[in-house]
Image (cartoon, rainbow, N blue to C red):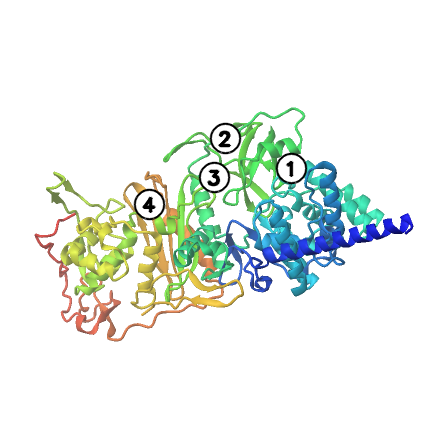
Amino acid sequence: MKPWLLLLRLALASAFGLFTAVLFAVAGAYLYVASDLPDTEELRDIQLQVPLRVYSRDGLLLAEFGEQRRTPVAYEAIPPLMIQAFLGAEDDRFFQHPGVDYQGILRAGLELARTGEKSQGGSTITMQVARNYFLSAEKSYLRKITEIFLALRIERNFSKEEILALYLNKIFLGQRAYGVGAAAEVYYGATLDQLTLPQIAMIAGLPKAPSRDNPVSNPRQAEVRRNYVLSRMYQLGAIDAAEYRAAIETPDNARLHAKAAELEAAYAAEMVRTEMVSRYGLEVYTSGYQVYTTLEGPRQEAATRALRDALLDYDQRHGYRGPEARVELDADGDEFHWRALLLNHPPMGGLPAGLVLAVDDAGARVFSSDLGLMELAWEGMRWARPFVRANQRGAAPTRPADVLQTGDIIRLREVADGEWQLAQVPEVEGALVSLLPGDGALVALVGGFDFSRSKFNRAVQAERQPGSSFKPFIYSAGLERGFTTASIINDAPVVFDDPALETTWRPVNYSGRFYGPTRLREALTHSRNLVSVRLLQSIGPAFAVEHAQRFGFETDRLPRNLSLALGSGTTTPLEMARGYAVFANGGYLVEPYLIERVLDAEGELLEATRPRAGDLAGKTGTTNDQRDAWFCGYNAALVTTTWIGFDQLQPLGSGETGGRAALPMWIAYMEAALRGVPSALLPPPEGLVTVRIDPATGLLPAPGQTNTLFETFRLDEVPRQMAEENQAPDTPEPGTPESEPLF
């Protein structure tokens, strides 16, 4: 036999032997791992980790909660250029290979033989899907073999488009972004269809090192990777030369974008998050639950605006405390330098920060990261008399230099369209709660000036003395005990001994005056303290506390003594709103609620809240030393409570009553919240009659008497006695049971 023929036979035999060995090796490897391969059909029912999202009743996003930012998208919604970018960067033969790129594996094997190091080559998109969905991150030959067989199985059961959709929705792309939808939002604040070619290439370059080389953590290296992806797209014909050059020359503008809330309601959203974790556990952060609240967008916006304006107006009345900070400016500083100086001063409560660059007689030149370069006119800072203490301000400024200097970091407040004013973040705080009296649905809730400054939710957590705003509940108890709105009680000085304090208590009216015999209706209207105390003394504090419980108040925070008449107990703004809702809805106690319905990730209804329910009116409230200012009011359609005070108890200052500090917030909100809502009066309960009375005595008028007024009574409480000329009013004698302390 000729030598060459022998060599051919040997070569063929060797090749066949090698092929057989490889075949047996592959078969053996498959048999070894086959029993442990997961069922790829599970991919059809895979539950991606989607965060909890909270919405208003009208579908506006309030917040999302979850460690992973993810916005799943259908394959049809992914721009073709993005698909080309990922294929160029990760797997250009994706649509040709069966899930495993044997050419890539061969290249990786040759590289291993040449260098002794494992190469990244050879891992297809399908293999990455297998790894990301089913396998651990360990690097071993066994895991690689399993990955290969699993990829082949996936390719048999899924179309290429389905595999790409699984990959592009699952892959980690840095900064808590999982999937291309989330990456577009996180880095560019955009949806997929809004991305430019360079932005698409940047995202497509992230899978190689998403944590280390993303455009926020390492912009220089990320741009190198972006340009590589662009070059691959050009080589593969996805883009032309002009597009490639333009994209390469485009600077990247990535920065972190929080999920844009469409409605500011952080305090309410946090209440929802807490409640959802209580109901469903920690899975709420990953299961894609959608919570629709009872908040109404226009009313919530009005509430936030009204609260901030009230606090800013209060703060301005008491003077300017100086700049938020003061920095040294470089003589050749530019916008980049100025932005860096403002980095730790993000917008707060709608007030952007500004850096004073120059001051002259006309005003100041200011740079703001949000507004750019602007001129702050003298009129916008003329108010800034220096703050000294709550009841004292310094001299009025006469020129801008009396208020500002170069390097000051200040706050800016828009007072009209395009007109800005010097401002400051107020130290005082406040809350607003608004609900529907018919069922308790919370339509607006603001727990403070800005959630980023303080997470303490004053709407539901601040237990403060309600002052005179609590008096309606005392008067309601009096009516329950047989008093009428025409009953006369003397508004005169009274002194009570208090053995426990070894002192005496001399309650007075806010004005310091005494008004003599007063009808209950008039006493409540004008908030007569002494009438309220005597009324409570007559009915007994214990009865009043029991009666207040029917309005939803917790009795352990209501003192069983006469100070209760002046609102010495503690309650929250939400509790006050619930109490006033009983007046507004005709006598039914409702349970305030915020969560209207909960949907799962597929939009199926999991639960819906069923309310547990059975012209304008309101009352101010001011506590001792003006530490708390309240206004609680309602009509048949809406109940709203507003509160202003310092978190650390201290006086608001002289004259800062509920009517001055809290009422403007209430009015501003209600004007907006009730716009377009028709006026409605509650129908009077059965068994009431309206008759003329003598205003001085509350009795029926004498024959021919002209100075009368109408009053409403229960049928069995209509006065039967007729007033006589010069008749003194019948004033109840104080008579508190001995077992109850006076205060």
Q: Is mark 3 on a helix, strand or loop?
A: loop
Residue 177 image offset from top left, x and y in percent:
59, 49
Residue 262 image offset from top left, x and y in percent:
55, 55
Q: Distance between the residues labelled 2 and 1?
A: 48 Å
Q: What element carries label 4?
A: strand
Q: Which of marks 3 and 2 is nearer the N terminus?
A: 2
Q: Which of marks 1 and 3 is nearer the N terminus?
A: 1
Q: Which residue position is annotated with label 3? A: 425
Between residue 422 and residue 394, name the one nearer to us: 422
Q: Earlier in the sequence, mark 4 or mark 3?
A: 3
Q: Distance between the residues labelled 3 and 2?
A: 20 Å
162 above or below 511?
below
Q: How far apart are marks 2 and 4 (CA)?
A: 30 Å
Q: Which residue position is annotated with label 2? A: 397
Residue 502 image offset from top left, x and y in percent:
12, 38
Check disc 2 and give the amino acid type: Pro
Q: Earlier in the sequence, mark 4 or mark 1?
A: 1
Q: How far apart are marks 4 and 3 (CA)?
A: 19 Å
Q: Which residue reaches farthest right?
A: 2
Looking at the image, is mark 4 or mark 1 nearer the viewer?
1
Looking at the image, is mark 2 or mark 4 nearer the viewer?
4
Q: Distance between the residues labelled 1 and 3?
A: 34 Å
Q: Which of marks 2 and 1 is nearer the N terminus?
A: 1
Q: Which residue position is annotated with label 1? A: 218
The reply to whether residue 365 is visible in this rendering is: no
Q: Which residue position is annotated with label 4? A: 628
- What crowding class fits label 1: few (fewer than 14 Cα within 10 Å), some (14-19), or many (20 or more)? few
Residue 486 image offset from top left, x and y in percent:
21, 63
Between residue 461 and residue 504, name the one nearer to us: 461
Between residue 14 and residue 112, name the one nearer to us: 14
